[in-house]
Image (tube, helix red, strand yellow):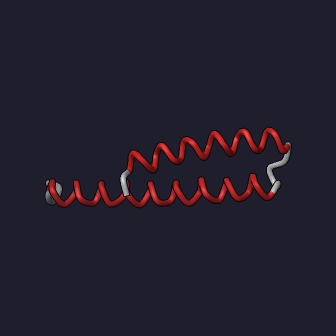
Amino acid sequence: MNKNLLVNQLHTLRLQLYEVAETRGSLTDPEVLALSEQVDTLIVVLQRIQRQERERESRKAGPAS
């Protein structure tokens, strides 16, 4: 998946999360929790992508001297 697209989706979801939490006045509201879970999922996906990128770069660089 495109990393930039995921970052943009994460930003949009975070804004929605803040807005819904403020409107509902509760962090335990079902809609707030659902958005929070979506944000968490995207964060995990992005962390995996970043880890894979670091691993690829490490392999390209070769063993440390």
In the rendered structure, the answer to whether residue 4 lies left or right of residue 16 reads left
Quarter of the N terminus within the rendering: bottom left
Residue drawn at x 59%, y 57% as measured from the top left: 40
Q: Residue 29: which quarter of the image? A: bottom right
Q: Residue furthest right?
A: 25
Residue 51 in picture, x, y percent from top left: 36, 58
Residue 65 in picture, x, y percent from top left: 14, 54
Is residue 16 shown above or below 62?
above
Residue drawn at x 39%, y 45% as measured from the top left: 4
Q: Residue 46: which quarter of the image? A: bottom left
Residue 38 in picture, x, y percent from top left: 61, 57
Residue drawn at x 82%, y 55% as measured from the top left: 28
Residue drawn at x 19%, y 60% as measured from the top left: 59
Residue 50 in picture, x, y percent from top left: 37, 54
In the rendered structure, the answer to whether residue 12 lies left or right of residue 59 reads right
How many marks on residues?
0
